[in-house]
Structure formats: C-alpha cells, structure tokens
Image (spheres, grey):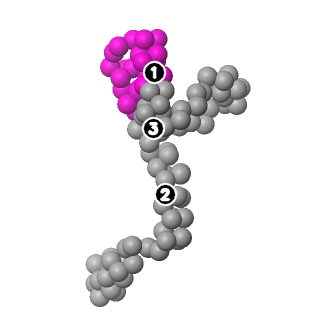
Amino acid sequence: MPYIKNNRRHLLEPVILDPQNAGELNYCITRLIVKYVIKHGLNYETMSSITGVLQDVQDEFHNRIYHLYEHIKCHENGDVYTELLNEIQKYKNTHLEEFI
C-alpha cells in the first residue's frame, strides 16, 4: 500500500520522474525494479516482494481510480449494460428464493 509516512514521502518525491508516455512509464518502473533487485539481491524474497507490490499497485489503482473513471464515463455516455442488468433483475425477481 502506498500510504507511507510523510517524512519518507518528502525524501522520495524528488526522485519521481515525469514520464511522457506509456513506454517511458514502463521504463521508469522497470528501472526502479532493477535498482531494487540489485540492492536486495536476486532471490525469491525480492522477486516475491516485487511481484506483490506490482499487483498491489495495480489493484489499488484499479479500485481507487479506474473504477471511478469508468463510473463517470458510464454516467456521461450511458450504460452499455442496461439491457443485461434488466434481464438479471427480472431473473432475480422470478427466482428470489435462490438469492435468499
């Protein structure tokens, strides 16, 4: 989780780069990972830490930002699942005992 103490945030903030596109973002993340592996060693604990952190970052971004963005766009442009959601609701109403 990215919620580290403020005194550590201030130390790390100056080294955060400014990627201009997805390729540069990928490069920056890759270089951070390479530096981390060199510092902590090429071993299972390091590999597991990295993959765990990357998954956590993805999950956190998806849950906090991506879902919100998708909800905003759904509201702005209309829900494409309305018909299917209505069908599901009809099914639930006729099979209510299965959901209780």
Where is residue 5, by image quadrant? top right
Q: Is residue 60 left or right of residue 89?
A: right
Residue at the spot 49% in from the left edge and 37% down from the top edge: 21
Q: Secondary structure at mark 3?
A: helix
Q: Is residue 36 left or right of residue 92?
A: right
**Residue indicated by mark 3:** 22
Label 3 neighbour load within 10 Å: few <14, some 14-19, many 20+: few
Specify the segment rendered in magenta. Answer: 29-52
Image vertical order of residue 99 relative to residue 54, above or below:
below
| Pointer 3 or 1: first along the chain | 3
| Pointer 2 or 1: first along the chain | 1
Residue 9: give x, y in percent of width and height.
66, 28
Which numbered dot is residue 31?
1
Residue 87 vs residue 97, the one in the foreground: 87
Amino acid type, mark 1? Arg
Regarding residue 74, the answer to whether it shows in the image is: yes
Residue at the spot 46% in from the left edge and 49% down from the top edge: 62
**Residue indicated by mark 2:** 67
Which quadrant would the C terminus be assigned to in this image? bottom left
Residues under labels 3 and 1: Cα distance? 14 Å
Amino acid type, mark 2? His
| Pointer 2 or 3: first along the chain | 3
Residues under labels 2 and 3: Cα distance? 20 Å
Where is residue 40, by image quadrant? top left
Amino acid type, mark 3? Ala
Residue 90: give x, y in percent of width and height.
33, 86
